Amino acid sequence: MQWRGLSPEAWGRITFIEAPFCDGCGAPFDFDLGPDARCVACADRRPVFDHARAACLYDEHARDLILKLKHADRTDLAGLFARWIARAAADILPDCDAVVPVPLHPWRLLRRRYNQAAEIARPLAHQTGLAYLPGAIVRRRATASQAGKSGEARRRNMDGAFAVPSAARERLGGRSILLVDDVLTTGATVEGCARVLKDAGAVRVDVAVIARVGELTRRPG
């Protein structure tokens, strides 16, 4: 039996992230250190966003599914991913007011024909009853690929890449935003988005993704 192309065997190969995990970036811990515990990376350099949650680890099994959505027109998977994210972010969703997808640059959107983050964010907003703000952020600069870059190089690559249109600012002021993307690697992209959202008046920005890069266990300092 299959569920929209996802067999029980494929489901069983996904490494879903369960508590305990870092309260900042969502990286899984190997043992419980109590509420609000943060990993070494978040303790050394607090992210611009407030919290991040990921449904699963980004390994070869999750990657294959995500790439089907991203490059193979499998937008039918978006609803499934939205449910995964809603479960992973259940502890922060009650504090959120609106869902915002990480945007694509117009040229990339033209080539791909859809934004995979928006395809996930739309059903997530519907499932949770949150406002959906697809135009809250624009990508004003076509950035080079992040693949192979260090964390610092990724952050430099994202400098000035995002902006909040003036028409969207009034919808952000005083609100708590859930920023949605497909994969969290170093966090450079979502930090760039979180920065402009807060500059535009958002009081809190949390991040929710399908998968995050990292090891299954990650001890705090």
Image (cartoon, rainbow, N blue to C red):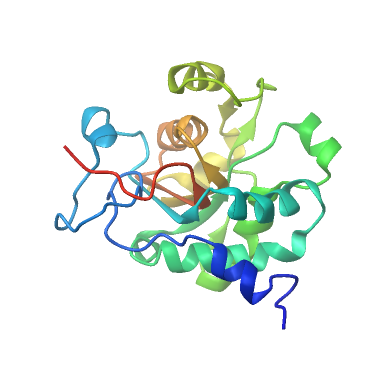
Image quadrant occupied by the N terminus: bottom right
Closer to the camera in the image, 57 or 139: 57
With respect to residue 97, does 1 lie above or below? below
Closer to the camera in the image, 204 or 188: 188
Quarter residue 31 falls in: bottom left
Residue 125 seen:
no
With respect to residue 81, does 185 lie above or below? above
Residue 126, image x, y percentages: 59, 69
Residue 208 seen:
yes
Residue 174, image x, y percentages: 37, 48
Closer to the camera in the image, 1 or 134: 1
Image quadrant occupied by the C terminus: top left
Q: In the shown orientation, is residue 205 left or right of residue 3?
A: left
Residue 84, image x, y percentages: 52, 66
With respect to residue 192, does 211 lie above or below? below
Closer to the camera in the image, 30 or 76: 30
Question: Which residue is depicted at the point 36% across and 63% down?
Answer: 18
Q: In the shown orientation, is residue 49 left or right of residue 14?
A: left
Question: Which residue is depicted at the point 45% across and 69% down?
Answer: 87
Residue 96, image x, y percentages: 40, 59
Question: Which residue is depicted at the point 39% across and 67% down?
Answer: 90
